[in-house]
Amino acid sequence: MVSSPKPWNREKEPFAELISAAAIATRVAELGAKITEDYKDKEDVVVIGVLKGSVIFLADLARHIALPIKLEFIGISSYGDATVSSGVVQITQDVSTPIEGKHVIVVEDIVDTGHTVGYLLENLKTRRPASIALASLLHKPERQERDVKIDYLGFTIPNKFVVGYGLDVAQQYRNLPYIGYVTGA
Ligand code: 5GP
């Protein structure tokens, strides 16, 4: 018998639930089905997860894509003040194989100002993939400064600092099974 994860002690968590684990699972399955439909006639599909925030979303999404995709990861870090996204981004870990001629789907945790993923998409486009699309679990439109087209979006959220399902607070809580926002309680 398969057992469910042990529930977290809600009284000790300084977070309020914004999106439940069940709602995430439903939406991720829908996105996977849509990607399967859109790419069913394509060869050489590469799904690139942006470390570290996308890994849990990517792991679930990939299992809802019923096609022989390849998985890659890319690591990026922002220069300068960590609390203000400048879009000046450094690639700290690159994909392991060239993407030229391949159908690329970039998987991100969140599009906030849009600078980070905007830079990344621009960089990847110079490598001449056959196509490039963006899947993001979350989008904060109130904060967006740079125009970025999200082809596969999980949820639009208000301007709150969110955590869980891959997103961190000081590198912790990425393994929270739901998306919460910091209440400070
Ligand atoms: P952007 O360049 O779009 O402003 O920022 C993108 C990155 O900032 C995301 O990939 C994520 O790592 C981080 N980020 C933006 N908003 C949040 C948030 O609400 N919570 C967490 N944990 N990280 C965020």
Image (tube, rainbow, N blue to C red):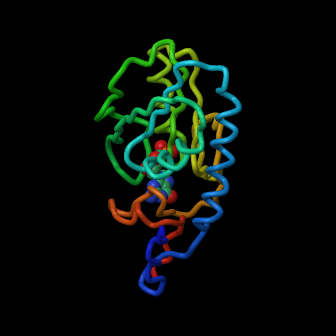
Q: Could you say where residue 64 lies in the image, as x and y percent from the top left?
A: 59, 44
Closer to the camera in the image, 98 or 87: 98
Q: Quadrant of residue 175?
A: bottom left
Percent from the top left, x then y, of residue 83? 40, 54
Residue at 46% from the left image edge and 87% from the top image edge: 11
Left or right of 39, for residue 51:
left
In the image, farthest residue toward the left: 92
Q: Identify the residue shown where x is 30% and y is 33%.
A: 93
Q: Is residue 52 left or right of residue 179?
A: left
Q: Position of residue 47 (x, y in %)?
A: 49, 32
Q: Is residue 109 above or below residue 92?
A: below
Residue beneath the point at 45% across and 57% down:
167
* Left or right position of 108 against 170: right
Q: Nearer the viewer, residue 64 or 107?
A: 64
Q: Residue at x 34, y 49 (%)?
A: 81
Residue 166: quarter of image:
bottom left
Q: Residue furthest bottom?
A: 11
Q: Residue furthest front?
A: 1
Say if 142 sits above or below 91 in the image: below
Q: Nearer the viewer, residue 26 or 114?
A: 26
| Residue 96: image location, x then y, percent | 32, 25
Instruction: Report the number of numbered marks.
Output: 0
Q: Is residue 154 above or below residue 74?
A: below
